[in-house]
Amino acid sequence: MTTIYHNPRCSKSRQTLALLRDQGIEPEIMLYLETPLDSALLVDLLSKLGLSAAQLVRRSEQEFKDRKLGISGTSEEQLVAAMVECPKLIERPIVVSGDRAVLGRPPENVLELIDA
């Protein structure tokens, strides 16, 4: 089963979903802005992605600046908590298949999951 953590307002997320469908894959669509992730799921996704929270957080979002998350000493736990509280801070889309995940930036990254 393939799952996409999707934001329909994001062009990269829409492109990634279209690419999956073009490959004959109809993923389970998780609208993470409507149904936010809990910290355990987010930590699991980070593990599958092989990324740190600092690598997954959207630094360009105003909430990132407002919460002063860019200062040195911000812990992984603080970043995870911020992404749980404000899901728009999560880089998107995330596509999961089994025990692997990729960030759909660029959308072609999802081909790694399909070809594996």
Image: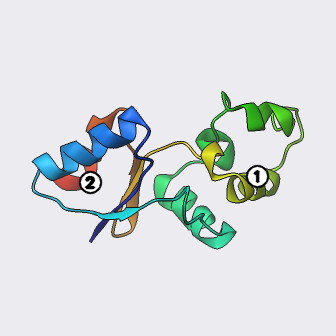
Please report whichever mark, 1 or 2, sits nearer to the chain's N-terminal start: 1
Q: Secondary structure at mark 2?
A: helix
Give the amino acid type for the residue marked by disc 2 in the picture: Leu
Residue 116 visible from this viewpoint = no
Q: Is residue 70 above or below residue 26?
A: above
Residue position for label 1: 82
Q: Is residue 97 left or right of residue 70?
A: left
Q: Residue at x 79, y 58 (%)?
A: 77
Residue position for label 2: 113
Q: Hey, which quadrant is residue 42 in on the image?
A: bottom right
Where in the figure is residue 97, as x and y percent of width and height?
A: 32, 64
Q: In terms of depth relative to the viewer, which is nearer, 16 or 96?
A: 16
Q: Quadrant where the C terminus lies?
A: bottom left
Q: In terms of depth relative to the viewer, which is nearer, 93 or 98?
A: 93
Q: Is residue 81 left or right of residue 48?
A: right
Q: In terms of depth relative to the viewer, which is nearer, 85 or 78?
A: 85
Between the residue at mark 1 and the residue at mark 2, the CA separation in whole angstroms equals: 28 Å
Q: Secondary structure at mark 1?
A: helix
How is the protein colored in the picture?
rainbow
Q: Which mark is residue 28?
A: none
Q: Hey, which quadrant is residue 69 in on the image?
A: top right
Viewer-nearest of labels 1 and 2? 1
Q: Residue at x 16, y 59 (%)?
A: 25
Where in the figure is residue 71, as x and y percent of width and height?
A: 87, 32
Q: In terms of depth relative to the viewer, which is nearer, 33 or 58?
A: 33
Q: Residue at x 66, y 27 (%)?
A: 60
Q: Residue at x 59, y 43 (%)?
A: 56
Residue 9 visible from this viewpoint = yes
Give the amino acid type for the residue marked by disc 1 in the picture: Ala
Q: Quadrant where the N terminus lies?
A: bottom left
Crowd around label 2: few <14 · some 14–19 · many ≥20 (10 Å):
some
How many numbered circles does the render carry?
2
